[in-house]
Image: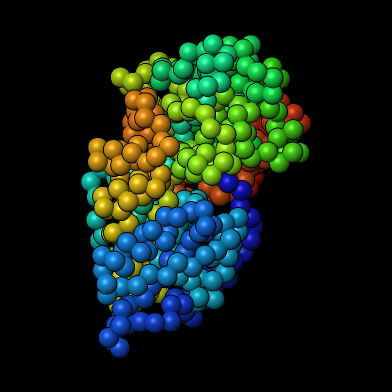
């Protein structure tokens, strides 16, 4: 969730300077003029634990034998910084994976992404608007994670608390955490909330309808007061302890240290894998919609509001000829229903969800099979965490500081919000 914004900005400036000098992609084979397949490269990260890149590459090459795809791995933590450096040096991949939407405008401004407005995304796919800048499309989404609430059914049973039914508001959430605390075994918290700013702000922004680019952050007061209260009441591990002990959300939920956890749907695949390998305990679990502001969006007869950003593929602006054709074809394939079913089959949440994809996803061994989990995965209004703007990275940096100040107890919500709004006026405008 955290990235080195200054470094990315500096490298982006370098890329702007070098763009004028040209600089193509770094795949060395290929044009098909020698009779062999056209080879393109695709950027990725954490290939050993993020199987989607190689899966898509292999499936695309199998479907289109005239093309070969090589996945170029980058360090996950420094992905945008390293990728920007390669692009500035003319060594960038032909297909550029957009790991974080907030950096898309930087790549567009640097002239690194091709306009792919002519490519048609499948009907019903989510996340396409996040890749539009000034009316032009610069990437197509292939996955779209949304935030849900994971819960440990066995711990609920031990505490004598009824499972979530999809109707919880935030008041219901707090009330049920209090019930859980009273009945849980020693060492287990009612909830685990990871230290990312998005765990509080993402949902608050989406459910309030606030626009963080306007610099008014007053809507964050109530969510932070609630969250700080949960810490003080011992319903979840406190922020400072979490940071000092470098707790991971995978271990906290997977080792049954918490009965509930707000987290992105990507964790489904992780938990299935870790339970199979023994890294996580074996227990019954499911997931429900995140708690809602009020009853108007709560319950399975309504559409719950949550947040999440897509992950997409873009074409290097310097790819041309056969490489450009292959890269565009790869984008179309990765966003297709065929690819969506393939991704769902390995526990990845694709950007395109329909009945066939839902059936594939929940047929994965180890996945929950209850109706509420299926509802939470398939039915939601997902608003972006990061608006597509060249201001977003700076604003999120300010809000990250706000989050740390409040959660660590160094500032009250009121004081931290006032400071963030002043910084917005002075630093963003």
Observer-nearest of 215 and 248: 248
Apparent side of residue 82 relative to residue 379 in the rendered image (left or right):
right
The C terminus - image quarter: top right
Q: Residue at x 27, y 75 (%)?
A: 66
Q: Residue at x 35, y 82 (%)?
A: 30
Observer-nearest of 248 and 106: 248
Query: Is residue 258 in view from this perspective?
Result: yes
Q: Is residue 189 above or below residue 115?
A: above
Query: Is residue 215 in view from this perspective?
Result: no
Q: How many marks?
A: 0
Observer-nearest of 94 and 346: 346
Q: Position of residue 316 (x, y in %)?
A: 41, 69
Q: Is residue 377 above or below residue 38?
A: above
Q: Residue at x 68, y 27 (%)?
A: 237
Q: Position of residue 321 (x, y in %)?
A: 30, 78
Outermost bottom residue? 34
Colour scheme of the rendered structure: rainbow
Apparent side of residue 423 relative to residue 387 in the rendered image (left or right):
right
Apparent side of residue 10 relative to residue 238 in the rendered image (left or right):
left
Observer-nearest of 30 and 317: 30
**Location of residue 184 by image quarter:** top right
Q: Is residue 210 above or below residue 119?
A: above
Q: Residue at x 52, y 53 (%)?
A: 49
Q: Is residue 137 above or below residue 185?
A: below
Q: Position of residue 144 (x, y in %)?
A: 39, 44
């Amino acid at each position: 969730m955290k990235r080195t914004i200054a470094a990315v900005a500096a490298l982006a400036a370098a890329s702007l300077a070098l763009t004028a000098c040209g600089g193509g992609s770094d795949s060395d084979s290929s044009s098909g003029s020698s009779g062999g397949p056209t080879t393109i490269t695709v950027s990725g990260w954490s290939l050993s634990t993020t199987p989607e890149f190689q899966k898509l590459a292999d499936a695309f090459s199998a479907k289109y034998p005239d093309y070969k795809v090589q996945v170029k791995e980058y360090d996950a933590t420094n992905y945008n910084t390293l990728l920007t450096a390669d692009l500035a040096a003319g060594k960038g991949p032909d297909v550029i994976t957009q790991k974080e939407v907030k950096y898309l405008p930087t790549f567009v401004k640097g002239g690194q992404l091709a306009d792919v407005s002519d490519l048609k995304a499948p009907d019903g796919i989510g996340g396409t608007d996040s890749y539009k800048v000034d009316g032009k499309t610069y990437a197509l989404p292939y996955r779209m994670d949304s935030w849900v609430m994971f819960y440990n059914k066995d711990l609920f049973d031990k505490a004598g608390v009824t499972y979530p039914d999809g109707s919880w508001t935030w008041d219901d959430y707090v009330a049920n955490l209090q019930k859980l605390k009273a009945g849980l075994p020693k060492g287990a918290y009612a909830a685990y909330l990871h230290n990312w700013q998005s765990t509080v702000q993402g949902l608050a922004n989406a459910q309030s309808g606030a626009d963080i680019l306007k610099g008014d952050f007053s809507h964050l007061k109530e969510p932070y007061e609630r969250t700080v209260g949960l810490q003080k009441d011992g319903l979840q591990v406190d922020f400072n302890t979490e940071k000092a002990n470098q707790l991971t959300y995978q271990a906290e939920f997977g080792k049954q240290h918490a009965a509930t956890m707000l987290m992105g749907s990507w964790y489904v695949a992780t938990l299935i894998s870790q339970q199979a390998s023994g890294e996580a305990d074996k227990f019954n679990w499911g997931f429900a919609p995140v708690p809602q502001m009020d009853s108007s969006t709560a319950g399975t007869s309504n559409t719950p509001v949550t947040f999440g950003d897509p992950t997409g593929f873009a074409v290097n602006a310097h790819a041309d000829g056969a490489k450009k054709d292959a890269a565009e074809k790869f984008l179309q394939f990765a966003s297709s229903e065929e690819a969506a079913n393939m991704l769902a089959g390995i526990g990845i949440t694709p950007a395109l969800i329909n009945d066939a994809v839902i059936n594939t996803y929940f047929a994965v061994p180890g996945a929950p099979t209850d109706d509420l989990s299926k509802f939470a995965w398939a039915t939601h209004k997902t608003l972006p965490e990061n608006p597509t703007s060249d201001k977003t990275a700076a604003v999120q940096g300010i809000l990250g500081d706000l989050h740390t100040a409040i959660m660590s107890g160094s500032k009250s919500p009121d004081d931290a919000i006032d400071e963030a709004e002043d910084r917005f006026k002075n630093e963003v405008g």
